[in-house]
Structure formats: structure tokens, C-alpha cells
Amino acid sequence: MPLRKRLFSLFAALAVTLAATAASPRVDPAQLLREAVGAYGKLSYVGQIQNVDFGSSHTNAVLFRVEHRAPDLLRRWYLAPESLYGDSIISHGDMEYDVDVHQRRVVVARDDAVDDQVALDDNFDLLLRNYKAILGPNDTVAGRPAFEVLLVNKYTGETVIRLSLDSTTKLVLQRERFGSTGAVTNQMRFEQIRYTASIPSQVFDVPGGYRRVKGQNHGLPSNDLARVVRAAGFDARGPRLLPEGFLPVTGDVTDVQGVRTLHVMYSDGLRTISLFENARGAAVDMSHYTIHAAKVRNYDAQYVEDGSTTLLAWQQGSLHFALVGDLTVNELTRIGASV
Amino acid sequence: MTEHLGYETLIDYMHAGLTPEQDAQVYAHLESCAVCRSEYDSELALTDSLRTYVAQDAREMPASVKAEIWARVRDARPSAIAHISDWFRPAVAIPMAAAIALAAYFGTAYIGPRGPAPIDAAYFLQDHASLASTVPFSDRSNPDAADFQTSNAPTAVDPVAVSTTASYMADATP
């Protein structure tokens, strides 16, 4: 083939490639995730959501209607299970009102961590450091086209979360979490969604005539962990072994029933582990759950499962420990053994 | 006093059992009445003879017998029953009961295995969920299910609330 023809073919191929690239906009998964994190605070919508927590032996499922007016008004109306039917949760920023129509009471609680933008940013940086975002095949959720993004752990190669993001608004329409075995541990999915800016304020009013009950407040945690540990007032201990990518990110010291309790949370940006400890001999009351026996090294331990969350508790000398996380009991036991 | 003293009066006089006035009258009578004096002396002699006889009857035990008895007392071990009964002797039992009562009143806050009440597992789960809400795509950083802190007794839903919800479902899809 003459040189002129060869050059022509080469330029033609290049032109076609460039044209094709220009026609389909490049999608940056990391940018998608960033937009997804901010979407909730910018969009107003009504819809219906199904959430299922898959434990190792049983499953908790709820179905609820949701009204959200940006940036931070939210109401969830429970439709199922029947035991929750008619109850609702109203959120005004960091204030939460659990409306219990059955007992005609409202449980009021404040959670300062909801507004902790610094912690959110830190965790998002950790997420990008420890996870690779991979675009999956396009999807359709609740009748809306969606981008599928897989978050794959860089150290284990395991997919930890699969997100379906509204292709226009980037809102998370579906989320699936996977355990270390590959089993699905949680699925959240919009069954219906409509974006609307005209949600009446009364929807978010806390109903009157109900008895108000103080719920469990949560103060603003600190990322100055050295100060937090000093504030505990006892010789606190931490795990020497954590899954790859986990770091201590935040903590607090709280007096629980008069017992000074240290709480340090470890995160890899997506998954979290909490270690609670006290030196006052206060054990964990698991009587409302199905209790299982375990061993942390040679120490007798007990654990319970709440959906996909496991709580492992044991005593080691004068210290009482409770380890909580969306991990299997074997994973938690290994971490506990290194404390 | 001209009459002779009676036997009872003489005995009471001997044992100093009369009033001072009677004692003085009897003393004066004995000084002047030989019959009563003789009777009084006879009674004194009889009393002295009785004391002498009693004193002679209380003989000293031989030293060897006393030593043997004390040796057996020292070697003898009390029985278990005797041990237990010792604890109930008033000299031991009363102070011991008082000490137990004081310990029960003041001491239970400081001694014994009683620690603080256990903390409900729900506290740990909720506090973990609270801090975990700062993680992207966690349960609480997106509008999906959250812990509901109410009882679960089933009753009818408020129909007004549901219809309010449905009335503004205008589609504003971007």
C-alpha cells in the first residue's frame, strides 16, 4: 500500500476514534461518587424505599415512604412491617423525632455527628484511598436510568458496595453492601421516586398531643484521639490488628449510666468498627437479643447480631470491651484478640 | 428491860440484825441479866463450834491430785459442738452481731462483687451507628432505614397523614 494511502487510513481511524470519544461523555467514577455524596443535601423528593438487612441467620426488612426537602428535612413513614405501620421518623438536621403512634409518644434525640462535615470529608478521602471505583453496566432503578458504580477494596479485591446512581441527579437509588464472604448484607432500594420542590412544611411538623420522651443523644465526636483517650481517665487499649486500610478516625468519651465509656471508631472510608471500653466493670446487657458464646483469646465472650451488625463483648482484666461493626464475628474476634 | 430476852432476839443480836435502839437495849440487858448472858454465851459457843467443824471439813486436796486434774484440763480438746457453742456465748455473740450489722449497713457499697449495672447493648449499636453516619453511603448519610426507637404494637395508621402525603406527588423530575 502506498504511503499516502496508509497515512490516510491512519488519520481516518484517528478521526473516528476522536469523534466517538466526543460523542459519549467520559464518566469519572470518583467524580460520580463526589456528586452522589452531595446530592442528598441538594435534592427534594418523595418516594418509597425498601431496606433489607441480611444477618447471618435472619433478615430485617422495612418499607417506608419518604419525603425529603433539601437540605435537611426528612420524614419516613413506615408501611411495613405491620408492627411499625403508621410510625414515622422526622429529622430536622441533627434533631430526630421518632413518632410512635402506638404508644402516643415522641422520642426526641439529637445527633451532632449528622452535621460533622469534617468527618464526612475525612472519610471520603479514606474511601478514595482504599477503594477503586469501577463503572458497571448502566441500570434502571425505580424507572430511572442509573450509573452503576462498584467500590472495590484495593487490598482484598472484594467489592464492598454496589451503588446505582441516578444518571441525572446522582442520588443513590440503590445500594448493596457485601460481606467478606461475598454475601449481600444490606440492600436499600427506591421503589418509587419523584423529585419535587413543593413539599408542605406541615409534613415535617412534629405532631402535638403526644408525650415527649428523651432519647439517646450523641455529642459531636472528636478527631483529636489523643485528647479523647486522655479524657477517658484509664489506661485504654486499642487493637494492634485491623483490616487493611482501617484507621482510627474519631471518638468520644461519654458517661453511660455513670460509667465513663471510651468509644473509638475505626474506618476505611466505607466500613466502620467501633471499640467501646470502660474500667468500671460495666458489662453489656444483651438480654434483648439472642446471645451467642465466643472466645477472644482465652477470654469468654458473647456476641449478638442486629441485622448485618455484630456486637462482640468481653472482659479482659479490669477492662470491659465491646466491639461493633458490619463484620462477621470471626473478623471481630480476630481484631478483639489483638487488643 | 426487865423480862428475859427471847431466843429470836438473841440470835438477831448476834447477827447484828436489830435496830440501833434495840441493839442498845439488848446490850444493856445482857450486862445486867446473868440468865440472858448465859444463854447468849451458849449460843455464841454453839456458833463457834459449828464454824470450827465446817472449817475442818473443807480439807485441802493433795498437790499431786491437783496437778493431775490441771494436766488433763490443758490436754483436753473441746468438741465441735463445744466450739460452736462458744460462738453463742454472750461475750462473743453480741459483739459479733453488732459488727455484722455495721458491715451490712456501711460496707456493702465498698466491698463485694457488686459492680455498676450492665449497659444495654442497644446503646453500643446506636452510638456506633451515630459515628458511622459520617461515612459516605452509610445508613444515615442517605435517606434509608434508620433505627426506630419506639414500641412495635400494631395499630391503625393515621389516614389523614397518608392522604396528605399523596396529595402533592406532582412530578418535578429533572
Image (spheres, coloured by chain):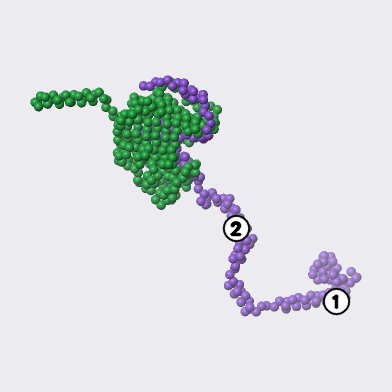
State which quadrant residue A23 falls in: top left
Q: Earlier in the sequence, mark 2 or mark 1?
A: 1
Q: Nearer the viewer, residue B163 or B57?
A: B163
Q: Residue at x 33, y 37 (%)?
A: A159
Q: Colour of chain B?
A: purple
Q: Contact (CB < 8 A) between labels 2 and 1?
A: no
> The chain coloured green carries which letter?
A
- Say few, some or many: other residues with alpha carbon within 10 Å of mark 2 (under 14 / 14 to 19 / 20 or more): some
**Can residue A221 be spotted in the picture?**
no
Q: Please identify the quadrant where the C terminus of chain B is shown.
A: top left
Q: Residue at x 89, y 72 (%)?
A: B4
Tell me the chain of label 1.
B
Q: Nearer the viewer, residue A36 or A339?
A: A36
Evaluate whether label 2 is on the same chain as label 1.
yes
Q: Residue at x 72, y 78 (%)?
A: B56
Disc 1 residue type?
A: Ser
Disc 2 residue type?
A: Met
- Whole-percent x, y for residue A17 in the image: 20, 26
- Whole-percent x, y for residue A8 in the image: 13, 24
Q: Which residue is mark 1?
A: B38
Q: Which residue is mark 2?
A: B96
- Say few, some or many: other residues with alpha carbon within 10 Å of mark 1 (under 14 / 14 to 19 / 20 or more): few
Numbered mark located on residue A331 in the image: none
- What whole-number distance in Å separates the C-alpha atoms at marks 2 and 1? 64 Å
Q: Residue at x 79, y 75 (%)?
A: B47
State which quadrant residue A220 falls in: top left
Q: Using residue B18 as the reference point, say whether residue A318 is left or right of it.
A: left
